[in-house]
Amino acid sequence: MVKATHEASHRLFQEHPEALAPVFEALGLPPPSKDDFDELSPDATEIRPMERRVDTVLRFAPDMGENFVLALESQTKKDPDKARSWAYYVAYLCAKYDLPVVLVAVCRDRATAAWAAGPFECGVASWPTQTTRPIVLGPQTVPEVTDEATVARRPALAVLSAIVHSESRRAPAILEAVARGLLSFEPDITKYWFEMVEVGLESTPTRENWRKLMQDVITHFPGHRTLFEEKYLEGRAEGKAEGKAEGEARGEAKGVLRVLEVRGLVITDAVRERIRTCSDLTLLNDWLDRAGTVGRAEDLFAPETGHPELREDAS
């Protein structure tokens, strides 16, 4: 079964091969352009019962310079069998496309990354017939992106950094910078990158941290009902086990509290409980609209709105 990390790496390099800049630096080549790549079939199956597939295969074909094939593999643990498979992939792709091949291994932990660098030799005694030496994209080689401006300029590399450094002690700082930097894009693009990181982190504690960050940095303009904010709240409401209506109410309530918190208003336990337990979507929508302008959190419940519940409470 294809794991989430493999799927994220596959999509990232397929759709944004510019994330391979560290590989080109290792090769002594200038950073690549997305237009210089063609996607090739990952099928490395011969006419035999065994099926073999590389995670991602790209051809680097610039207008000027040497063409070559990149075979990319996501590796989450040491695997002696994989070393033999990698040797086969390199030999097969070289023969199939009549081009030199660069093998790239993507690893999240340092021990696996150190192992994946090889070299892996096939030979007898002191005579190596074939040597496989992958270039590793791992904690030792991918930069730690902690600057929001870098995220905005190079989002693909930033996403790779978040995934590769997910087990690092610097992971929280990297995730926060990536999350905030990705908000510089249009909502649909931000959502795409957010999901890419979430899938790449799999079911780890780091992924839960990322999901919390997605809540905390939902919008630059809380309470203004921007498209991204509305889509986010709708998404949180959908799929709630409590049912659609209750899920929407919970999402709206969290949105109201978040706006008040971002504005630095004091929220008493009584106010927080009243907002959380409210199931009236009309009232919650009114509170969310007004949360960005009220002077105190308690002013949300003022009777000026004319809502029946408010008039009753005021009496």
Image (cartoon, grey):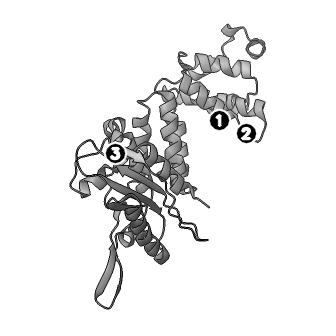
- The label number, if any, that marks residue 240 in the structure image: 2
Residue depicted at 62% across the width and 30% down the height: 233
Which residue is nearer to you in this view: 246 or 11?
Answer: 11
Q: Tag 3, which secondary structure?
A: loop
Please rate how many residues cluster around mark 2, counting C-alpha atoms within 10 Å: few if below 14, some from 14 to 19, many from 20: some
Return the disc, 1 or 3, that comes first in the chain's sequence.
3
Separation of disc 2 and disc 3 at Cα?
A: 34 Å
Separation of disc 1 and disc 2 at Cα?
A: 8 Å
Return the disc, 2 or 3, that comes first in the chain's sequence.
3
- The label number, if any, that marks residue 236 in the structure image: 1
Residue linked to disc 3 = 146
Q: Tag 2, which secondary structure?
A: loop
Q: Are marks 1 and 2 in contact (CB under 8 Å)?
A: yes
Q: Is residue 50 left or right of residue 74?
A: right
Measuring from the top left, give residue 187's x and y in whole percent. 50, 28
Q: Three-letter amino acid code at disc 2?
A: Lys
Measuring from the top left, give residue 218's x and y in whole percent. 52, 32
Separation of disc 1 and disc 3 at Cα?
A: 28 Å
Which residue is nearer to you in this view: 294 or 128?
Answer: 128
Q: Three-letter amino acid code at disc 1?
A: Arg
Q: Tag 1, which secondary structure?
A: helix
Most extreme residue toward the left, as rendered?
28
Which residue is nearer to you in this view: 149 or 98?
Answer: 98
Measuring from the top left, give residue 165's x and y in whole percent. 40, 56
Residue depicted at 51% across the width and 56% down the height: 6
